[in-house]
Amino acid sequence: MSCIPELTKKLRARGYRITPQRLVILQALHEGGHLSPLQIYDRVHETGISEPTVYRTLDFLYSNGIVSIATRGNGHMTYELSGDSHHHIICRSCGDQLEIASQLLEPAISLIERETGYQLIASHLTFLGLCPKCNSISK
Amino acid sequence: MSCIPELTKKLRARGYRITPQRLVILQALHEGGHLSPLQIYDRVHETGISEPTVYRTLDFLYSNGIVSIATRGNGHMTYELSGDSHHHIICRSCGDQLEIASQLLEPAISLIERETGYQLIASHLTFLGLCPKCNSISK
DNA sequence: CTCCTTATTGCAAATAATAACAATAGTTAT
DNA sequence: ATAACTATTGTTATTATTTGCAATAAGGAG
Ligand SMILES: [Mn+2]
Ligand SMILES: [Mn+2]
Ligand SMILES: [Zn+2]
Ligand SMILES: [Zn+2]
């Protein structure tokens, strides 16, 4: 799923082209966790890639299901290769982060799908909350 | 909860000040649905409010629990007064939107809270998916 | 290998969002 | 009403993101 040769095959099959820029950005994503567009640009601009291309490529990868978007606390977006399905919890007070397995939400997802008729792409949600520490302080 | 005199009281109690700018922005939010910062700016700039103040005020209202943030399909943020708790589903193909009652998620939320120890502020999530129409087409 | 088609890129310019900081103006106390 | 304190604002400058368009180059056909 996150193996680059496979991805290129899939994209080509859909009529898209594999460019050096796309490969470099995929590489960068392959190495590190949740990256903002500018963090990715920092890692790859030495190859001559332009900023708009970074933004456009991330959009492109997202709309092809290859990367997931997560929101940071502040509202900024970060990107990562869509691998195993998980969600995030961010403590609104101290910023502490936690990943939770997607299975925890599956029953609810199924329920919503039955109720609405929608088929959900419910990966990589971000929940806000208070971690146990901050929660006890605030009492 | 969304009654302006009550809100001002609450904010003052916390040591914040009630300014004309904040009141005007609250008014704008009170009138319409999900608004982006610039949409709000368009509605209020005739009063002389500056753009930074719009952004800052929205942040401020958010961190005081008075407005909720929702993401649009594209990743842009929109704001609305936090009223009754609900979530959104957006069709990734046609953009169609749907609100779902928050109760549908409550069991999952409770489960996550038990598992992680976090207390979640799980209002106003946005799910992506395919609406029934687009889903049947894509088969 | 060469030619075509057109998806994709870089550049330049436009918009959107944030930051710094001095000036302003709510609020409380006198 | 006046004064003092400081949260909040507008201005200006900076950074982040998006758009338009001509130039480039990936992929397929011959
Ligand atoms: Mn993630
Ligand atoms: Mn909403
Ligand atoms: Zn915390
Ligand atoms: Zn649809």
Image: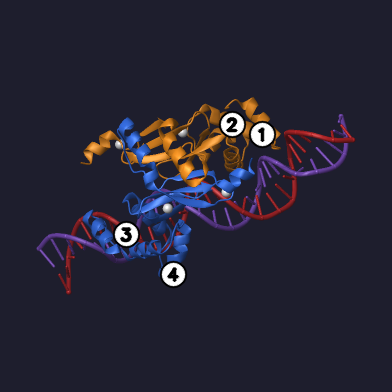
Chain colours: A blue, B orange, C red, D purple
Q: Which residue is mark 4?
A: A46
Q: Disc 3 versus disc 1: distance between alpha carbons?
A: 48 Å
- Asked if the residue at tag 1 contacts the one at tag 4, i.e. Cβ–Cβ closer than 8 Å, the answer is no
The amino acid at mark 3 is Ser
Residue A104 at x, y percent in the picture: 39, 44
Q: Disc 2 versus disc 4: distance between alpha carbons?
A: 46 Å
Q: Secondary structure at mark 4?
A: helix
Residue B117 at x, y percent in the picture: 52, 45
Q: Quadrant of residue B26?
A: top right
Q: Which residue is mark 3?
A: A2
The amino acid at mark 4 is Glu
The amino acid at mark 1 is Leu
Quick one: quadrant of the C terminus of chain B?
Answer: top left
Q: Which residue is mark 1?
A: B11
Instruction: Judge by depth and name the residue closer to the eye, B45 or C21.
Output: C21
The amino acid at mark 2 is Leu
- Of mark 3 and mark 4, the one earlier in the sequence is 3
Q: Quadrant of residue A54?
A: bottom left
Q: Residues within 10 Å of mark 3 (few under 14, many from 20)?
A: some
In the displayed structure, B129 sits above or below A57; it is above
Q: Are marks 2 and 1 on the same chain?
A: yes
Q: Residues within 10 Å of mark 1 (few under 14, many from 20)?
A: some
Q: Secondary structure at mark 3?
A: loop
**What is the number of the mark on residue B26?**
2
Q: Seen in the image, is D16 located left or right of residue A18? A: right
Q: Secondary structure at mark 1?
A: helix
